[in-house]
Structures are given as structure tokens and as C-alpha cells.
């Protein structure tokens, strides 16, 4: 008899301390050992995790009013500009924003040592940040200038709001040209000298629910070391199926999440300011999604292993910036994690931009919260568009 569970039933088991929770790593072995049907009957929740650079991230900050009051029209935090076209003392600091006066800016574009992601990390770490603000002055907001030091505790509200996080699957980046290139996928050596990838594979949240059967608006998640929520699909949300050169489905494509959480609950080890040589600044984010095992079909995807999950190999030299495509085939995450792949008979060393040990730690922490009854599942009020809904872009095919 097939298993059918509800969120209410699973949450009741969590509250009673009876829920069976496995990480996405652990459930793979469980299914191999005793089969899909028996495991689905036993397991309530599978936890996932990822810890990698996520450029489309940032934070809304409310500074509170000064005396006399001021409408802040230009704001910088540690000399990093923040967007102020919101309200009098609200601003949004983006993870990839960089200082206009960074000494590396004029001589070596992309060599920024500090950016918006670092500001966010410093705030979460309790460090003092220099706030500068300018205004043109009005009758109700007469003050024109302010310069002061702030900490996270000084802010009325600080909300992490990331428009595009947790990419479902991403490229394995290579460089076919004769020169070194610097990209958001790291430094790529010429003539296929290395291959970089940035997804945690069998722990990756959206790879373990590729149909978005359980993930939607209101899904409660691990975000930056605290509790956050899925609030919409992320920008560039194109869930679909990755196909090999023969047209066989070998994995999922590019769904994304828009997520939100209280910055004051978060931890600096899970929000790390990051820089890429020749590219700029970003934020490395820790994110984990619990997958309720509502039925056997959901478990089938949650139990996929690195051997069964694949990434497209993409040339980031002239082909990538100048046209859509440049795909050279697919490789499994097991191959990527082995430290080398074979492309056209050539052995290429691989390296991850995301941290698999940290992803494992996130999945484990989320499992612990659920088992202790500190984290209940959030039932989505609306599921996100998935590949089976017919609402997405074209499947990602390898040409």
C-alpha cells in the first residue's frame, strides 16, 4: 500500500518527538538497503543543505531616525553604497556592491577586496560598521548629513532578502581559450586546464525535489544559521530537465528560490563575504530545505545519489558571454567530486566553489532542530512552478 502523509501528520510527529528524520546523504543508503517502499513508510523528513556563493543576495536595513530627522538619499556602509529609494531611513545593501573608492577599482577592475557581502557578514558578526548618509533636506526631514558607527543591534530591523538563491543545478565551468579567464565560477585556466563547479549534488536542496512538489511560498528553511522562509520563486527560475546528447533525462536544470529571514538570528559562519579575483564581491550563503516525505514519489527523487545527478559542462571563454549554449556534455557529481573528469580524452582536475562538508553540516543541523521539536515544517500556501506544471522555460539540452 502506497504511503500518503500530510504536513499536519508530520508536524504532529515532530511535536511528539517521534518523527524519523534523515539527511539526504543518509536516505540514499537507507533506500539502497531496504528499498523505496519500506523507507517511505518509515521516514518523515529528508534534510538537505548547500553552502556556496550566491550573488543575488542582500539585506534590507532600517536605521531609525536621527535628531533632527533625515531622509537618507545616499547611504554607504563601510564605504559600500546601499540603495535608498525606499523610504526615509531604509536601505538595501546588495552582496555584489563594491566601494567606489576601492584602491583596486581604477587599476584592476574586479579586484575589489571588500563589498556588500562583507558588510553583511560584519554586521552579523557584531562588528562596528561606519554609516554615512547624505540628503537634500526637507521641512519634515531637515538634516542633510550624518556619519556614525552602528552595529546590528542598533538597527530597528535587518532582514536578509535574497532574490535568487539555491540554484537547483549549475554549470561545470571550463575554459577552451588560450588565456586565463576570471569569472564568477572562479579562475579558469586555458586549454581546459581545470573545471570548477558549485552545487552540493546529492545534498543540494532543489535537486532533491526537482518537481517542486513540497517547496513553495511559506516553506520554512535553514537560512544563514537561523530560520528563514521561501517567499517566491527566485529570479531566473527555469526548472526543467537536463538532457544528455542522446536526449535522455540525466538531472534537473535551473530552479531558484527567493528567500527571507531575520538577519539578527543568523550566524557569521553561514553568511560569509567572498571575493572572486577579476570578478568582484559576493556572499556565500548557508541554506537548507527540509523535504517532507508525503509519498513514495517524493522519496524517489530525495534518494538520488551523486552517480545519478549530473551537471552540464560549459565553456566560459568566448562561447559563454557571446551566445546561449557552449555546452560540451554532462558529467555526474560523483565524477566531479572524484577530483577529475574526462573531456575529449583529456583528464581535467575539478574543484568545488561550494563546500560539501558545510552542506553536510547544514543538513545535520536542520535534522537536529526537527528531531528536538524546535523546527516545524511550513506547509506552502502555494507551490512554486515546476517542470511538470508546464509553466517554465525550455528544458536545458546539451547541443
Image (tube, helix red, strand yellow):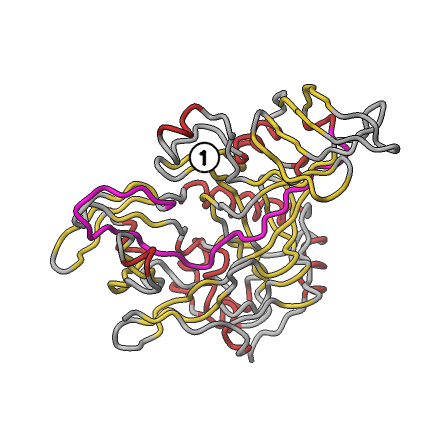
The reply to whether the magenta stretch includes residue 262 is: no
Q: Is residue 165 magenta?
A: yes
Which image quadrant is residue 232 in?
Answer: bottom right
Q: Is residue 105 above or below residue 345?
A: above
Residue located at (51% from left, 30% from top): 100
Q: Secondary structure at mark 1?
A: strand
How packed is label 1: few (under 14 Cα within 10 Å), some, or many (20 or more)?
A: many
For the C terminus, the image quarter is bottom left
6 left or right of 46 in image: right
Res 76 quadrant in image: top right
> Eyeballing the image, is 382 above or below 90?
below
Q: Is residue 379 left or right of residue 67?
A: left
- Residue 359: where, in percent of width, then height? 46, 45
Question: Which residue corresponds to mark 1?
Answer: 274
Q: Residue 339: x and y, percent? A: 24, 46
As displayed, is residue 146 above or below residue 12? above
Q: At which x and y percent is residue 310?
A: 33, 62
Is 30 positioned to the left or the right of 18 in the image?
A: left
Residue at 70% across, 28% down: 134
Rendering coords of residue 14 (x, y %)? 67, 54
Q: Quadrant of the N terminus?
A: bottom right
Give the number of callouts. Answer: 1
Identify the residue at horizontal 72%, vertical 59% (top origin). 12
User: Residue 16 falls in which quadrant of the image?
Assistant: bottom right
Q: What range of the chain is rendered magenta?
A: 155-184
Question: Is 218 above or below relative to 53?
Answer: below
Q: Residue furthest left?
A: 345
Residue extending farthest to the right is: 140
Amino acid at each position: 500500500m502506497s504511503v500518503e502523509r500530510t504536513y499536519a501528520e508530520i508536524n504532529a510527529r515532530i511535536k511528539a518527538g517521534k518523527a524519523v528524520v534523515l539527511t539526504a546523504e543518509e536516505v540514499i543508503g537507507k533506500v539502497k538497503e531496504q528499498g523505496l517502499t519500506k523507507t517511505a513508510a518509515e521516514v518523515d523528513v529528508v534534510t538537505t543543505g548547500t553552502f556556496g556563493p550566491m550573488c543575488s543576495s542582500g539585506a534590507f536595513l532600517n536605521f531609525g531616525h536621527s535628531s533632527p530627522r533625515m531622509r537618507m538619499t545616499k547611504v554607504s556602509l563601510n564605504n559600500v553604497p546601499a540603495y535608498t529609494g525606499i523610504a526615509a531611513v531604509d536601505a538595501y545593501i546588495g552582496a555584489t556592491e563594491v566601494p567606489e573608492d576601492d584602491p583596486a577599482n581604477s587599476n584592476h577592475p574586479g579586484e575589489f577586496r571588500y563589498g556588500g557581502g562583507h558588510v553583511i557578514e560584519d554586521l552579523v558578526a557584531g562588528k562596528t560598521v561606519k554609516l554615512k548618509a547624505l540628503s537634500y533636506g526637507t521641512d519634515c526631514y531637515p538634516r542633510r548629513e550624518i556619519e556614525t558607527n552602528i552595529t546590528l543591534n542598533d538597527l530597528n530591523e535587518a532582514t536578509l532578502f535574497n532574490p535568487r538563491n539555491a540554484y537547483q543545478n549549475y554549470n561545470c565551468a571550463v575554459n577552451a581559450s588560450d588565456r586565463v579567464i576570471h569569472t564568477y565560477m572562479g579562475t579558469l585556466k586555458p586549454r581546459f586546464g581545470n573545471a570548477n563547479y558549485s552545487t552540493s549534488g546529492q545534498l543540494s536542496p532543489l535537486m532533491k525535489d526537482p518537481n517542486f512538489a513540497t517547496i513553495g511560498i511559506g516553506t520554512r528553511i535553514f537560512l544563514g544559521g537561523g530560520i528563514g522562509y521561501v517567499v517566491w520563486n527566485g529570479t531566473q527560475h527555469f526548472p526543467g530537465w537536463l538532457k544528455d546528447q542522446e536526449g535522455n533525462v540525466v538531472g534537473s536544470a535551473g530552479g531558484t528560490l527567493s528567500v527571507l529571514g531575520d538577519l539578527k538570528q543568523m550566524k557569521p559562519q553561514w553568511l560569509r563575504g567572498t571575493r572572486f579575483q577579476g570578478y568582484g564581491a559576493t556572499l556565500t550563503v548557508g541554506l537548507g530545505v527540509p523535504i517532507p516525505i508525503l509519498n513514495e514519489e517524493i522519496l524517489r527523487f530525495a534518494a538520488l545519489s551523486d552517480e545519478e545527478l549530473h551537471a552540464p559542462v560549459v565553456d566560459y571563454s568566448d562561447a559563454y558571454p557571446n551566445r546561449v549554449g557552449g555546452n560540451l556534455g554532462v558529467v555526474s557529481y560523483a565524477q566531479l567530486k572524484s577530483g577529475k573528469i574526462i573531456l575529449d580524452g583529456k583528464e581535467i582536475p575539478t574543484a568545488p566553489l561550494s563546500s560539501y562538508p558545510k552542506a553536510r553540516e547544514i543538513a545535520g543541523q536542520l535534522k537536529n532542530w526537527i528531531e528536538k521539536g524546535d523546527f516545524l515544517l511550513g506547509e506552502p500556501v502555494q507551490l512554486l512552478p515546476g517542470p511538470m506544471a508546464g509553466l517554465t522555460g525550455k528544458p536545458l539540452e546539451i547541443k
